[in-house]
Image (cartoon, rainbow, N blue to C red):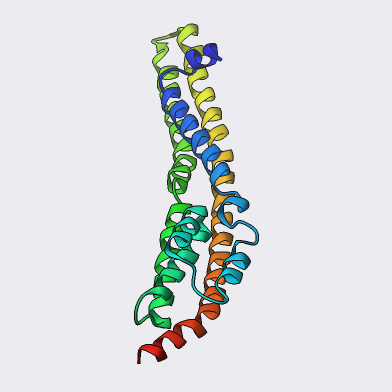
Amino acid sequence: MLSIVEAAGWPIWPLIACSIAALAIILERLTTLRTAKVIPPRLLEEAITVSVASLPAPDTIDKLERNSPLGTVLAAGFRAARRPRASMESLREDLENSGRTVMHKLERYLNALGTVASAAPLLGLLGTVVGLIEIFGSQTGTSTNPTLLAHGISVALYNTAFGLIIAVPSLMFYRYFRGRVDDFGIELEQAARRLATHLQPQVEAAARTLS
């Protein structure tokens, strides 16, 4: 591996940095964007069951918020319902704001991964251009320096190949994570609607009591 890096020349170092960044992001997102971690099974059903008779206590809502991204959205709905003079409009608004915040967190680092996928081939092309410059630089009059010629070819080919090796899996994982985040967004939206429908009788009853 060291011999390949030496043969590829200095243009390989930005590509190595991109590969490290892409690998770190992919591993982090694979850990974070798990269904059981984002939308735990039965969490919505348990939250609805617990709040059939009355709204959960504040400490229970705090625990729910720390549970998962879905728990964060549900906790926002319960807090909105517990506020004095709560209304369905304010409840839905709080659910939407919480959902946007959660989605922003789920999309973390994806732009960076997409940037690596786009930049890696360009950095590989830069290495190719540098290699070609060295190839032309090996021409001295009527003679050719075979060492410089071989080095220029190595720089050109290794950087092109390494750029593609980084770009292809980075792009694949970027698309994969984007799809998962979009799916999670739909599920979170559906859960928020179910919670709003479930809390509507309690919110309206509290409003009638205050009026």
- What is the residue that sits farthest to the right in this orientation? 41
Q: Nearer the viewer, residue 91 or 2?
A: 91
- The relative height of residue 186 versus residue 196 in the rendered view (above or below) is above
Residue at x-position 56% and y-position 54%: 38
Q: Residue at x 54, y 39 (%)?
A: 26
Give the image location of residue 6, x and y in percent: 48, 13
Q: Quadrant of residue 122?
A: top left
Q: Is residue 61 left or right of residue 41?
A: left
Q: Which residue occupies 53% across, 23% down?
A: 158
- Compared across the picture, whether 49 is left or right of 71 comes to right
Q: Is residue 128 visible?
A: no
Instruction: Classify residue 179 as left or right of residue 208.
Output: right
Question: Considering the image in quadrants, where does the C terminus appear?
Answer: bottom left
Q: Is residue 139 visible?
A: yes
Which quadrant of the figure contains the N terminus?
top right
Q: Is residue 158 above or below residue 36?
A: above
Viewer-nearest residue: 74 or 47: 47
> Where is residue 149 drawn, in percent x and y?
48, 13
Above or below, comparing residue 133 to residue 38 in the picture? above
Residue shown at the point (49%, 24%) measured from the top left: 156
Q: Position of residue 13 (x, y in %)?
A: 42, 23
Q: Position of residue 25 (x, y in %)?
A: 49, 39
Q: How many numbered discs, if any?
A: 0
Res 143 quadrant in image: top left
Q: Is residue 141 above or below residue 165?
A: above
17 vs 146, nearest the viewer? 17
